[in-house]
Every structure is written in structure tokens, then in C-alpha cells.
């Protein structure tokens, strides 16, 4: 009998991560798109690091940082009562860092690609930066927003190395689908591994297909 | 009354160009800024709108200070009562014509003015369409109407008609003139089109490399070469040929190429590409540099 737990946990993790990333990613992307600050290249680099870094490197440093024996891990543990290693909360934070570029980069380039007159026209019409962002800028970069949301979601589903390093393999807590597959293969349960893999394969295929259909305008053409 | 005193180093392809402007514009006037691209015309409009900060200077509009470098006053674009029409209209593509105008309403403003504006620019039939489905001239009218929703004191027009064909241009000039009078605006236009300037404006300032080189009424400033000569043309020097005693200057006037015999002293300051005045004085064509 197959255990659905890892799959459910995977989607729960991906969903929570994506929601938090939308909230964090939009202001960060806005700042990166328009700031002329000198530290901007540094922030850009940091945001993009997870793209090139082996997940195990990120996982390793997070493990060190989150560990109760480190100053930061200890502080979190004592003041907020959160233990971030081998826990779901730790996975969420790690996933946010790991998938950050997938949310920030599409939105940033979407914003940077808009004619600056939209923003200026809105300011001259007396609208605040906030109103301009939500009423003018974001509605005009819907494809970029969709790309950011879907890629972050899909990328979180595909996580392995980071999870393995700081989450371990605790059923119902940190045992996500990718870990479960590894686990089943280790135990020579190829059938179960195959089922998990097929489900992930199918789901990610359809998620990405949806993005390309929507952003490519194919759905609109069908609707006509 | 608008008092402008603006100083700024503008970054151009040729390096930094200092912009130094000192002008006063009377309330209700229609003023045009005329000059080559890169002379700083658009920058002046942007500074007035608060989109660009001068390095130094003062902007005083009807006795309220919008910008003053000595007291570090600098009102945000949101706080300045201006309407701005961008060269490429900057209509919001995801909103219909009507929504574009409604977006411009301030918080407690009555939406009745929207109806009036839509009627005025004759967009009633198109009000529920998105800007991308409209022609250039129609988009232009939407932009004009949107700039007026907040009842600005000053209307800034940044080469608004340059992308339109002549017929549309003439029609939109009438719209602009109509709103200028009806809403009692002070209007500042950036334009390259001499006919348009003479038709619309009370006063014109000619800009050259960041400085105002000439100001006055359009007929004074733009047609000042009309002298007593029997005939006169302006053209561009396309070749200068040295002959034994004299030189032959080839000038393009309109679509005609004309050869003019000139003395050595006359061609001393001439270069290929110069704009020249060709006029006849007592049967002798004279040629003299005018720019």
C-alpha cells in the first residue's frame, strides 16, 4: 500500500513556500528593478546564488546556521521556540531561500521591461508608489507573475539536496516525495519509487504546460 | 505665473551638457519650446512635472514653491498640479479608455467630469475599448483627456503630435487649443513643427544646447528673416567647390539643388551641412550663414 503522506507534504511545502515568496518576492523584485543603490549588485548576486550553488552547499550552511548549537539557531530556538533543523518550518525557510531567484527574477525583469512612462504617468496623476505598483505595474506583468509563481512552486517540488541536508527523513514532517523516492530505491522497492516518480512527472509536466499555454496566448486563441 | 530657473548637467551621448534656463510664463499663456533634439526641451518639462530633479534653481508656480534648491524643497510629482501628455501617450494598456480616465480621478473627486471629457474629445463610442485597438489620433485624445481629469493648472505636452499624419495633426491642434481655452490652462508645448507653433502658441522659446537663444512671439522669432530682399530661400549646403577665382556652393533648397557662385570671403565660414540663407539683392545673389 502506497503512502500518500510524502506527496501531500511536498505540495503543502510548495504551496506555503510559494505564498510566502509572492509576499517577499514582489517588494524585493520592485526594489531590484528600480533601485540605483550601490549595494544592488550584491543583493542581486545573493538572490541568484541558489541557481548555481549545489543544493547541498546551501543545505550544509543552513544546517550549520539553524543548528541549536549555533548562535542564530539557539536564538530562534529560545526566543521563538522554533527548531529549524529536521522540522517542517526549517524546510519552509530553506525552500524560500532556495526558490527565491525563481520568483524574483521573472518579476524583476517584467518590471524593468515596462515603459517607465507608465510609472511616471501614474505619479503625475497623483497616485502613490503603492497604488501604481498594484493597479498599473503588476497587472501589466501578469505573465511574469505567473512564471514566478509556477516556477517557484515547481522548483520547490523538485527540491532534494537541501531537504536531505536540513530536513532528514522524518515521515509527516520532512519526508517529501523526492526523499521518499530515494528511500524506496534504497530499499529496492522500485514499484513504489516508480509510482511516486510518475506522479511527480505528470504533475510537473502539466504545471509547466499550463504556464506555456497561458503565457503563449494559446488558451485565448482557443477561446475565440 | 510660473517662474522657472533651472540648472542641471544633462547626460547626453556627447558628454555632459549644462542646461541653464531662466524663464517666466504668464498664467493662461500657450508657450512653445522649440529646438533640436537633445537641446533640453523634454528635460524642462520633466523638471516641471517633478520627474527629474534640477541640480540647482527654483520652480515657483502661482506663488507656491515646487522646487527650491536653497531650501531643499522638492515637491513630488503627485503633489504638483500638472497634466502631462507623453510623446508615446503612456496609456495603461490593461484598462479601457474610460478606466484610464477614471484611474486619474483623485480620491473624492466627482466622476461627472469624466463624462464631460469623453464628450469633449469625442470618444463616447470608444470608451469601453482598450487603447491598443485605437488609432494613434484616438489614443492621443485619450491621453489629452486623461491629463485633464485632475484639473491641472499647467498642461505639459511633450511633442504630442509628432507621430501623427498631417490631417490628424491639424485636428488635434484644434482639440488642444480648445482645452487650453476652455480649462483656462497654462500650456507648455514641445514642438518641432513651425506651422503648429505659429497656430497654437503665444510665445516661443528657442533652445540650443541647454540655453534659450531667442524668445518672443512665433512670428517674431520664427519668421524674422523676412527682409527687403526680392527673393530668399533657406537651404542646406551640400557641396563647396573651389574654382580659380570664385567658389561654387551647391545648396539644397526644398527638393531643388541650386548652384551659387560665391566669393572666397563668403565661403570662409561655410561648411557642408550648414543651413544657409540664399537671397537676391540687386541682382547679385548673396549667400550668408544663418545658423
Image: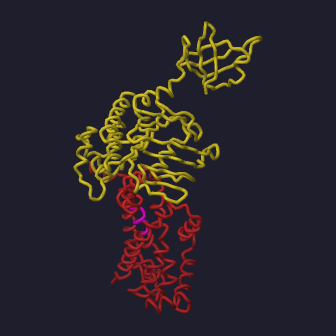
Q: What span is colored magenta in the figure?
A: A145-152
Image label count: 0
| Horizontal and vertical percent position of residue B243 | 74, 13
Q: Position of residue B103 (x, y in %)?
A: 31, 54
Which residue is nearer to you in this view: B203 or B151?
A: B203
Colour representing chain A = red
Q: Main secondary structure of the magenta part?
A: helix
> Would you say residue A221 is visible in this rendering?
no
Residue at position x 58%, y 45% in the image: B19
Q: Nearer the viewer, residue B12 or A204?
A: B12
The quarter of the picture where residue A24 lies is bottom left
| Image: B283 above or below A107 | above
Q: Is residue A106 above or below residue A87?
A: above
Quadrant position of the N terminus of chain A in the picture: bottom left
Q: Which chain is yellow?
A: B
Seen in the picture, residue A112 relative to B241 is either above or below; the reply is below
State the image quarter where residue B187 is shown.
Answer: top left
Instruction: Name the side, left or right, on which B63 lies relative to A219.
Output: right
For image coordinates 63% across by 9% down, the residue present is B284
Query: In front: A25, or B92?
Result: B92
Q: Is residue A163 magenta?
A: no
| In this rendering, position of residue B108 left or right of residue A176 | left
Which residue: 49% across, 60% down? A33
Q: Is residue B242 left or right of residue B46?
A: right
Q: Residue furthest right?
A: B244
Residue A34, position as x, y percentages in the image = 50, 59
Which residue is most to the top? B283
Amino acid at each position: 500500500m502506497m503512502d500518500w503522506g510524502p506527496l501531500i507534504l511536498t505540495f503543502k511545502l510548495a504551496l506555503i513556500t510559494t505564498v510566502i515568496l509572492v509576499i517577499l518576492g514582489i517588494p524585493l523584485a520592485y526594489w531590484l528593478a528600480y533601485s540605483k543603490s550601490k549595494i544592488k549588485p550584491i543583493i542581486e548576486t545573493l538572490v541568484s546564488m541558489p541557481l548555481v550553488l549545489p543544493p547541498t552547499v546551501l543545505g550544509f550552511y543552513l544546517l550549520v546556521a539553524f543548528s541549536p548549537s549555533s548562535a542564530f539557531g539557539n536564538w530562534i530556538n529560545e526566543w521563538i521556540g522554533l527548531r529549524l533543523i529536521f522540522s517542517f518550518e526549517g524546510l519552509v525557510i530553506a525552500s524560500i531561500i532556495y526558490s527565491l531567484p525563481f520568483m524574483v527574477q521573472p518579476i524583476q525583469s517584467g518590471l524593468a521591461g515596462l515603459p517607465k512612462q507608465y510609472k511616471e504617468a501614474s505619479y503625475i496623476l497623483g497616485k502613490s508608489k503603492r497604488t501604481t505598483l498594484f493597479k498599473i505595474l503588476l497587472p501589466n506583468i501578469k505573465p511574469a507573475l505567473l512564471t514566478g509563481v509556477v516556477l517557484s512552486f515547481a522548483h520547490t517540488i523538485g527540491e532534494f539536496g537541501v531537504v536531505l541536508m536540513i530536513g532528514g527523513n522524518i515521515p509527516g514532517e520532512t519526508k517529501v516525495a523526492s526523499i521518499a523516492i530515494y528511500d524506496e530505491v534504497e530499499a529496492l522497492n522500485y514499484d513504489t519509487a516508480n509510482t511516486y516518480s510518475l506522479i511527480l512527472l505528470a504533475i510537473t509536466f502539466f504545471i509547466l504546460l499550463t504556464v506555456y499555454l497561458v503565457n503563449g496566448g494559446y488558451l485565448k486563441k482557443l477561446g475565440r | 505665473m510660473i517662474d522657472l530657473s533651472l540648472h542641471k548637467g544633462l547626460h547626453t551621448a556627447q558628454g555632459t551638457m549644462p542646461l541653464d534656463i531662466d524663464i517666466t510664463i504668464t498664467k493662461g499663456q500657450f508657450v512653445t519650446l522649440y529646438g533640436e533634439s537633445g537641446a533640453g526641451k523634454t528635460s524642462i518639462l520633466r523638471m516641471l512635472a517633478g520627474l527629474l530633479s534640477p541640480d540647482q534653481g527654483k520652480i515657483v508656480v502661482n506663488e507656491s514653491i515646487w522646487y527650491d534648491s536653497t531650501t531643499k524643497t522638492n515637491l513630488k510629482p503627485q503633489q504638483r498640479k500638472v497634466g502631462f501628455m507623453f510623446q508615446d501617450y503612456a496609456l495603461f494598456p490593461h484598462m479601457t479608455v474610460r478606466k484610464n480616465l477614471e484611474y486619474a480621478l483623485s480620491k473624492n473627486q466627482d466622476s461627472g467630469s469624466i463624462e464631460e471629457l469623453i464628450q469633449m474629445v469625442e470618444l463616447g463610442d470608444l470608451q469601453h475599448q482598450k487603447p491598443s485597438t485605437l488609432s494613434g489620433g484616438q489614443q492621443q485624445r485619450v491621453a489629452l483627456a486623461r491629463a485633464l481629469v485632475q484639473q491641472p493648472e499647467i498642461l505639459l505636452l511633450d511633442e504630442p503630435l509628432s507621430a501623427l499624419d498631417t490631417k490628424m495633426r491639424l485636428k488635434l491642434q484644434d482639440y488642444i487649443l480648445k482645452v487650453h481655452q476652455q480649462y483656462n490652462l497654462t500650456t507648455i508645448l514641445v514642438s518641432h513643427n513651425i506651422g503648429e507653433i505659429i497656430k497654437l502658441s503665444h510665445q516661443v522659446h528657442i533652445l540650443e544646447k541647454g540655453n534659450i537663444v531667442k524668445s518672443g512671439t512665433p512670428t517674431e522669432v520664427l519668421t524674422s528673416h523676412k527682409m527687403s530682399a526680392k527673393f530668399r530661400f533657406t537651404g542646406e549646403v551640400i557641396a563647396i567647390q573651389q574654382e580659380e577665382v570664385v567658389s561654387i556652393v551647391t545648396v539644397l533648397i526644398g527638393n531643388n539643388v541650386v548652384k551659387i557662385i560665391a566669393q572666397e570671403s563668403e565661403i570662409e565660414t561655410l561648411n557642408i551641412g550648414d543651413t544657409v540663407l540664399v537671397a537676391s539683392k540687386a541682382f547679385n545673389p548673396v549667400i550668408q550663414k544663418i545658423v
